[in-house]
């Protein structure tokens, strides 16, 4: 069995790195009853721009804030021959917002995954919860080191309890005699109190210092040793501010001779000696939110008498008399416990023995053996899991359809263009693009679901379109919140999208009043159709004309306009077409799926083989670029994708996902090839987390859709464009399933 480990690793000074090193050695050196030799390697995380001279087992490194490094690491692991991957997870060690750069790596893994969680937050932020849920979804097993973590995962993060494995934090098997260790450090005449680990404000060291004066009065032989460096992240942001505060506190309490700071990151061997030399080990953390503490585990493993505040891990680990607890920030309570133990050597020795005995049950060799057993079980069952995996589309996983966020964004003028998170941003006003999309969406919703709210909203958007039309049939686009026009003539894109919505209205009007209003606006604009030059303006207009002609197939003049516009697109294709670039422009930019979609609609109306051929060829070209990994990876508008250049991964927009959904739906409608429905559904799942960063853009609380995938993660604003793109996509998926059912009934 070959295991790939992903984590921080020594010589990087990091508690998780130390954990990984111990776990790695305990597994590869395991001398238990494994059926075959075990080998492994480490993929290590560098710290920001710092690099390290890693040991030989580290054969690949990731720069923390370089997402492409994560993708390269996934390829490396997949080609390494590894049978399983073990990931150590803590939000702060991976790049991107809340460490989300690790998600695309995990998604690309072709081997089973075990994840060890070092932090499980009780009140996570939106992103923290989404990241952790996605990691747990991709893992075959999730290892935690406390029962509290199991409770949080099942109740807060909705992780299946059967997926969770409880394996306690391992402890070293190195042991030193208490008296000999004290003698080596020349502490024979001292009662050594010890705290070790990275120093930061939440460690609560001031609580111990404040407790010392009362203790020293009775036990002047006490020495408090604080062993550890300031946490690297804290040092980068605040320097030694906390350590300096503690030094001032020491002076103010006149305990200079009783406190010693050892500003070092010591080896495990040295640490074991200090733990063995200590009389009492103290973890005075300031709040309960510590799900796992390696320092506490090591102290128990060394047989220390431990006093701690009741944070989550301590409450569990020190149960059954293995240690003493005092309240947060309670220096008086700590003083009393210290004096009680120092006055009673027998009780102190009893604590040490209970800790030592328990420590023998959680040594690294035992922990490594448990990980090996988990890995072997996963590998043994994984082939069956893969064989049973169903790749068919499933409409049951769609969230309930809801217009709640659209209603929130809509007033009596129209739909507000942008939002701050899920709240309308009135300062940005309105635009024609979004009101046209909104009209299309509510017409679809009423047709498919007879949604009364959709019918109530539709005249608002139609009225906005009417208000924005100029006398010559063109449209303004932008309107301020106080209803002032902000432009004279809008973009060709906004014109085309409006014609698309109006064309759909003329084929699907809920009543005659809507039809007559839409018809008037549509034909007032029609003289401008053939003046269009923008390929996307043309494409959107073609879709609108096609919808109109489905219900008015004898309009010869409109058929000719459709043909003329289609020929413009075909001409653009012929100008830019080459053996390796089957596209309409020398660049893939935004709303790309709209261009093949327009030709697919036109081909249905005009029944022209040439149009169908170009439509399918360009669709396949776009598909090969955006669906090659089994999920939708859109061209980001950060830099787009110029022919011969490098494609942009960020910022991916919901509008592009919508175009892909519509494109495959029309391809199915034209060809009856069900494979297009699978692709349609794959594209829709981009909204729900099947994307490059493995996070859902749909917000299950607001019922809105986030604005895109950026290099830092999800853009949490939920404007009209993104939310409408999601809802139109959702309705298209539902429509596709209805069409399948109808075809099956017709066959019967």
Image: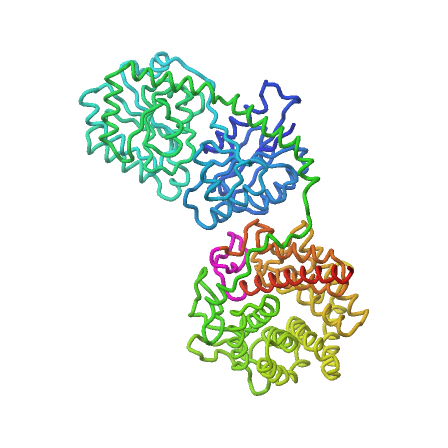
172 lies above or below 106: above
Please state the horizontal and vertical placement of residue 512, each as a whole percent of the image: 60, 81
Residue 702 among those drawn in magenta: yes
Give 520 or 180, whichever is nearer the viewer.
520
Q: Give the image's coloring scheme.
A: rainbow
Give 597 or 281, whichever is nearer the viewer.
597
Q: Residue at x 67, y 59 (%)?
A: 737
Please state the horizontal and vertical placement of residue 565, each as a whole percent of the image: 71, 76
Q: Quadrant of residue 625?
A: bottom right
Residue extending farthest to the right is 609
Residue extending farthest to the front is 748
542 lies above or below 645: below
**What residue span does the magenta drawing correspond to?**
701-721
Residue extending farthest to the bottom is 471
Give 201 or 246, whichever is nearer the viewer.
201
Horizontal placement of 446 versus 481: left or right?
right
Please state the horizontal and vertical placement of residue 604, each as a whole percent of the image: 75, 70
Please state the horizontal and vertical placement of residue 52, each as a whole percent of the image: 52, 34
Horizontal placement of 454 versus 678: left or right?
left
307 lies above or below 285: above
Horizontal placement of 345 versus 14: left or right?
left
Q: Residue at x 71, y 39 (%)?
A: 387
Q: Quadrant of residue 24?
A: top right
In which quadrant is the C terminus drawn?
Answer: bottom right
Q: How many marks?
A: 0
Residue extending farthest to the left is 217
In which quadrant is the N terminus drawn?
Answer: top right
694 lies above or below 268: below
Secondary structure predominantly adopted by residues drawn in magenta: loop
Horizontal placement of 228 versus 434: left or right?
left
Q: Residue at x 71, y 75 (%)?
A: 550
Residue 582 among those drawn in magenta: no
């Amino acid at each position: 069995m070959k295991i790939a480990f992903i984590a921080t690793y020594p010589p990087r000074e990091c508690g998780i790195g130390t954990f990984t090193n111990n776990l790695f050695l305990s597994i590869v050196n395991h001398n238990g009853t494994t059926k075959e030799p075990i080998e492994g390697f480490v993929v290590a995380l560098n710290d920001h721009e710092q690099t390290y001279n890693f040991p030989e087992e580290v054969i690949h490194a990731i720069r923390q804030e370089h997402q492409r490094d994560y993708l390269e690491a996934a390829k490396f692991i997949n080609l390494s021959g590894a049978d399983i991957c073990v990931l150590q997870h803590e939000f702060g060690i991976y790049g991107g917002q809340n460490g989300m750069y690790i998600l695309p790596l995990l998604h690309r893994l072709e081997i089973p995954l075990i994840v060890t969680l070092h932090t499980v937050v009780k009140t996570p932020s939106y992103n923290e919860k989404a990241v952790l849920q996605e990691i747990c979804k991709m893992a075959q097993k999730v290892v935690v080191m406390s029962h509290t973590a199991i409770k949080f995962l099942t109740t807060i993060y909705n992780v299946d309890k059967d997926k969770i494995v409880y394996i306690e934090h391992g402890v070293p098997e190195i042991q030193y005699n208490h008296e000999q260790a004290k003698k080596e450090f020349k502490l024979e005449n001292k009662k050594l109190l010890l705290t070790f680990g990275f120093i930061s404000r939440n460690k609560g060291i001031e609580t111990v210092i404040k407790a010392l004066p009362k203790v020293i009065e009775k036990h002047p032989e006490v020495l408090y040793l604080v062993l550890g460096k300031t946490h690297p992240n804290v040092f980068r942001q605040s320097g030694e501010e906390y350590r300096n505060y503690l030094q001032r506190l020491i002076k103010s309490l006149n305990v200079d001779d009783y406190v010693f700071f050892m500003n070092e990151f010591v080896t495990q061997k040295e640490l074991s000696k200090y733990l063995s030399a200590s009389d009492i080990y103290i973890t005075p953390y300031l709040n309960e939110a510590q799900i796992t503490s390696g320092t506490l585990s090591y102290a128990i493993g060394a047989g220390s008498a431990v006093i701690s505040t009741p944070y989550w891990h301590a409450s569990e680990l020190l149960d059954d008399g293995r240690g003493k607890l005092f309240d947060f920030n309670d220096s008086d309570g700590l003083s009393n416990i210290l004096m009680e133990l120092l006055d009673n050597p027998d009780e102190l020795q009893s604590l040490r023995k209970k800790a030592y005995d328990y420590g023998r049950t959680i040594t690294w060799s035992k922990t490594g053996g448990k990980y090996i057993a988990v890995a072997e079980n996963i590998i043994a069952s994984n082939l069956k899991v893969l064989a049973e995996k169903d790749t068919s589309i499933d409409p049951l996983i769609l969230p309930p359809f809801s217009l709640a966020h659209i209603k929130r964004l809509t007033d009596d003028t129209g739909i507000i263009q942008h939002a701050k998170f899920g709240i309308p941003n009135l300062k940005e006003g309105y635009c024609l693009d979004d009101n046209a999309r909104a009209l299309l969406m509510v017409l679809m919703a009423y047709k498919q679901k007879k949604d009364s709210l959709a019918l109530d909203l539709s005249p608002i958007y139609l009225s906005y379109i009417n208000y924005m039309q100029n006398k010559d049939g063109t449209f303004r686009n932008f309107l301020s919140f106080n209803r002032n026009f902000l432009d004279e003539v809008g973009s060709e894109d906004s014109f085309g999208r409006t014609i698309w919505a109006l064309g759909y209205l003329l084929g699907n009007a809920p009543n005659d009043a809507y039809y007559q209003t839409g018809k008037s606006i549509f034909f007032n604009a029609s003289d401008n159709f053939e003046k269009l030059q923008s390929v996307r303006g043309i494409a959107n207009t073609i879709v609108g004309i096609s919808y109109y002609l489905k219900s008015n197939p004898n309009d010869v003049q409109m058929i000719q306009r459709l043909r003329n516009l289609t020929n413009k697109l075909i001409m653009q294709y012929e100008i830019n077409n080459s053996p390796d670039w089957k596209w309409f422009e020398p660049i893939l930019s935004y709303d790309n799926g709209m261009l093949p979609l327009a030709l697919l609609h036109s081909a249905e109306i005009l029944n022209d083989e040439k149009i169908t051929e170009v439509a399918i060829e360009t669709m396949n070209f776009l598909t090969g670029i955006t669906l090659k990994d089994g999920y939708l990876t859109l061209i980001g508008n950060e830099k787009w994708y110029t022919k011969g250049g490098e494609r942009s991964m960020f910022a991916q927009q919901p509008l592009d996902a919508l175009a892909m959904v519509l494109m495959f739906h029309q391809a199915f409608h034209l060809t009856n090839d069900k494979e297009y429905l699978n692709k349609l559904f794959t594209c829709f799942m981009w909204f729900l987390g099947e994307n490059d960063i493995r996070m859902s853009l749909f917000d299950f609380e607001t019922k809105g859709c986030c604005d895109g995938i950026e290099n830092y993660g999800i853009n949490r604003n939920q404007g009209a464009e993104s939310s409408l793109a999601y809802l139109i996509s959702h309705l298209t998926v539902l429509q596709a399933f209805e069409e399948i059912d109808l075809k099956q009934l017709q066959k019967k």
